[in-house]
Image (cartoon, rainbow, N blue to C red):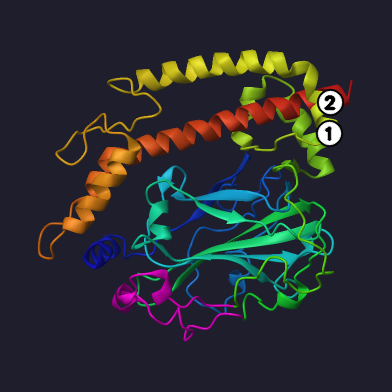
């Protein structure tokens, strides 16, 4: 496994880019395009370049970051976060931890900055089965983060970051997400909110100083020392009232709260015609609050019919762009090779990837990454793109219908 990590690192040693592309919390949120505002997304807009200076102001939420909308979720909710290098291009790195923090906004999260954010760590991930969790992002996978179940209700800013350690210096990829968290918890974790960005990390910290070839001495999570504070213990954080930890609220009532001006003016112009024509706005705002549910109820049957038509159209489009149709549950390969057949399932490709790395001998030509990409990569990209596209269309229609009912 050590040799496979080295080979993969050398293959992608140049500076690359990265964005949060999608968050699945029962319903989905698309990340904004780089440096482009999107009031329908809770993910903050930022540039795509890595940060190589731990003391840079960009360590707050990413290069030239700015807020967008906010999503509403319940305490205890689990989310899966996906990253891309650029639009529909898979994450390029495989080495280093993934760390996630929360900070209480004490008001509107759009007013948060590096001076006002006091962060507590809720999750950190390094290796799983001898492979960095980060490496799974290269295959179109995501990583799971769970919001503390006893967290007091309120507005919180989430900071999730990937730290790439394949070069001789760490590359930081932080991204922020604005959440309104609901539930009956009372724990603010204020005593644990000791981190600041910039300020918490130093290049000499354990977990950051070991980069380049030395990082490949790490063979398991127990071998790695994470930078920053410890992960909070649910039920024991600061300012807890001693009450029993709150149960997760009914899983993930997710809603994007956009600014009133966008709802009243920008959305009117975008939604005045066919709702699919506004797809470029990348909206992913599920209307799941009680008021929007009531507004959307009369149109659910029509929306279902439209979804059926769109699925038919997408299936037709997909088949016409490919030499042979491929079911969504299988991975399609443009050039079948000895490692991965054109009809191999995604699980089969994963198994072949693991076997290839285990069997690799230094000095031989390293082909595992290319073989895996041929076997599964294109299928994963197509599936994620299709899911995100359908989510945007459904959400856009729901928002359009709710908006029209509200104003008629």
Residue 17 pos. (x, y %)? 45, 58
In the picture, measured across the screen, residue 344 lies left or right of residue 62, that is: left
Q: Position of residue 383 (x, y in %)?
A: 44, 33
Q: Main structural element of the magenta stretch: helix, strand or loop?
A: loop
Q: Quadrant of the C terminus?
A: top right
Q: Quadrant of residue 298?
A: top right
The x, y position of residue 400, in whole percent, is 75, 26
Chain part drawn in magenta:
200-228
Dot 2 corresponds to which residue?
A: 294
- Number of labels in the image equals 2
Q: Secondary structure at mark 1?
A: helix
> Is residue 98 or residue 240 the one in the foreground?
240
Residue ID at (24%, 30%): 342
Residue 224, above or below 65: below
Name the side, left or right, on which 32 lies relative to 136: right
Residue 26 appears in which quarter of the rendering? top right
| Disc 2 + disc 1, Cβ < 8 Å | yes
Taking the image as drawn, is residue 52 in sight? yes
Give the quadrant of residue 41. Answer: top right
Is 205 covered by the magenta stretch?
yes
Q: Secondary structure at mark 2?
A: helix
Residue drawn at 78 percent across, 24 percent down? 296
Looking at the image, which residue is at 69% across and 25% down? 397
Q: Residues within 10 Å of mark 1 (few under 14, many from 20)?
A: few
Identify the disc placed on residue 290. 1
| Quadrant placement of the N terminus | bottom left
**Can you see residue 91?**
no
Q: Nearer the viewer, residue 19 or 149?
A: 149
Residue that sits furthest to the front in the current view: 244
Position in image of residue 192 (x %, y %):
71, 76
Left or right placement of residue 225 versus residue 105 in this view:
left
Q: Residue at x 40, y 27 (%)?
A: 328
């Amino acid at each position: 496994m050590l040799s496979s990590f080295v080979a993969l690192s050398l293959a992608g040693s140049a500076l690359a880019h990265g964005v949060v592309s999608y968050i699945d919390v029962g319903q989905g949120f698309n990340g904004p395009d780089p440096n482009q505002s999107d009031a329908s997304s809770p993910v903050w807009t930022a540039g795509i370049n890595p940060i190589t200076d731990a003391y840079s102001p960009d360590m707050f939420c990413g290069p030239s970051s700015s807020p967008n909308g906010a999503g509403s979720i319940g305490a205890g909710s689990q989310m899966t976060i996906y990253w891309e290098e650029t639009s529909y291009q898979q994450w390029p790195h495989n080495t280093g931890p993934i760390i996630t923090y929360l900070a209480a906004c004490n008001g509107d999260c759009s007013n948060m900055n590096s001076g006002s954010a006091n962060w507590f760590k809720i999750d950190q991930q390094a290796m799983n089965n001898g492979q960095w969790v980060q490496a799974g992002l290269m295959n179109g996978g995501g990583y799971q983060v769970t919001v503390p179940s006893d967290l007091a209700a309120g507005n919180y800013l989430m900071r999730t970051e990937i730290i790439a350690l394949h070069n001789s210096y760490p590359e930081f990829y932080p991204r922020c997400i604005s959440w309104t968290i609901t539930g009956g918890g009372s724990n603010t974790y204020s005593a644990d909110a000791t981190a600041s960005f910039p300020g918490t990390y130093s290049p000499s910290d354990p977990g950051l100083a070991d980069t380049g070839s030395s990082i490949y001495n790490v063979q398991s999570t127990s071998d790695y020392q994470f930078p920053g504070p410890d992960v909070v213990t649910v039920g024991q954080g600061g300012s807890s009232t001693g009450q029993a930890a709150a149960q997760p609220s009914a899983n993930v009532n997710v809603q994007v709260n956009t600014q009133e001006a966008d709802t009243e003016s920008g959305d009117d112009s975008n939604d005045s015609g066919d709702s699919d024509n506004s797809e470029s706005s990348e909206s992913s705002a599920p209307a799941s609050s009680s008021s929007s549910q009531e507004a959307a109820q009369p149109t659910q049957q029509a929306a279902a019919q439209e979804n059926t038509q769109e699925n038919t159209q997408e299936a037709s489009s997909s088949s016409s762009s490919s030499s042979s149709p491929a079911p969504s549950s299988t991975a399609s390969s443009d050039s079948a090779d000895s490692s991965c057949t054109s009809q191999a399932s995604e699980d089969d490709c994963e198994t072949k990837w693991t076997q290839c790395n285990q069997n690799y001998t230094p000095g031989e030509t390293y082909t595992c990454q290319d073989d895996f990409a041929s076997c599964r990569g294109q299928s994963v990209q197509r599936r994620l793109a299709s899911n995100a596209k359908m989510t945007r269309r459904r959400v856009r229609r729901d928002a359009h219908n709710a908006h029209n009912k509200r104003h008629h």
